[in-house]
Amino acid sequence: MKMFNLNSRLARRATATIALGLLLGAQTAMACTVANWNGGNSGNVTAGGPGADVARYAGICAMETPDATVAWVQDDSPGGIDRIRARFYVLADNSSSAVIYRGFTSTDAALFGVRLSSTSGDVTLFGDGLNATCAGCANAGDWNSIEFDWNAGGNALDLWVNSNAITDPADVSAAFSTANTISSVRLGNLNGAVGNLSFDAYESRRTTEIGRLLACNADPSDEQINILDALAVINEINEVELSAGQPDCDEDGLVTILDALDIINIINS
């Protein structure tokens, strides 16, 4: 398990989800793909795993979009629904405003989207007469979790940025009215924004909250932060094995000894 570069961003993995798994990968297979996105892709995305220089947040696979290039993956399984909840992580290395998510109607008309400005930290849910912004909520150069609930049937939307939808109130809420339904969604750099973007841990549902992953949980055998998580980070640094959990404890896009020290500090606290 030594086919990855520890001197730059490590290959990262999207959490497998039952509904819309971002990527397929296994340490034994040494491969990651975007094949689970049944609507295809732009051809410009990089599915990263062992041997690929792609930052990851959870597990061993993730996805990166190149600088100033339109690059996306698409899922057609919404198929005409009036409500969708989605949660994903994005590494905000863009220097211009990036449209990172879009929902489309059955005629492929853009219905709504998510825009990220890493310079201001603003995350905006926009489209169909709405414009709801979580001002200064994203951290430039770091992993950020974004979750939203687009509920046309209830004429309401909610947005969480780096907060937990299971336990926290929405950072931004708004009312809107639309007769359109969602037939497909895209994730990536949809407007060719300047800067590289990495995506991981995508999951979508109809109604129930998704929430954040447990940060620093490098060993996913339990939902606790303990010495096993520090050992998982050290094993990754030493090229023994990639962590199957969330080894990037400080969420800066790198897995280093500082992440192991952060975990030890959590244990000792």
Image: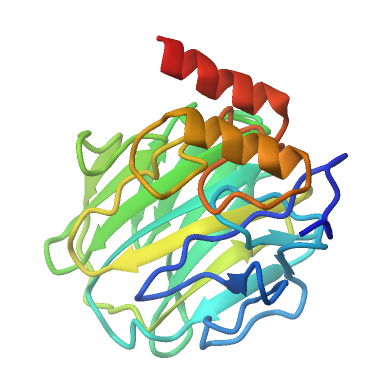
Q: Residue at x 68, y 77 (%)?
A: 29
Q: Nearer the viewer, residue 174 or 87?
A: 87
Residue 149 horizontal side relative to residue 26, left or right: left
Residue 194 horizontal side relative to residue 139, left or right: right
Quadrant in the picture for the N terminus:
bottom right
Q: Residue at x 33, y 78 (%)?
A: 182
Residue 261 horizontal side relative to residue 178, left or right: right
Q: Quadrant of residue 183?
A: bottom left
Quadrant in the picture for the C terminus:
top left
Residue 191 horizontal side relative to residue 35, left or right: right
Q: Visible in this render: residue 138?
A: no
Q: Residue at x 60, y 56 (%)?
A: 199
Q: Residue furthest top?
A: 269
Say above or below: 264 vs 9. above
Q: Nearer the viewer, residue 33 or 161?
A: 33
Say above or below: 44 vs 189. below
Place of residue 18 in the rendered image (x, y in percent of width and height, measured from the top left): 35, 74
Q: Nearer the viewer, residue 254 or 244?
A: 244
Q: Visible in this render: residue 62?
A: yes
Q: Nearer the viewer, residue 21 or 132?
A: 21
Place of residue 81 in the rendered image (x, y in percent of width and height, measured from the top left): 25, 80
Say above or below: 120 vs 17. above
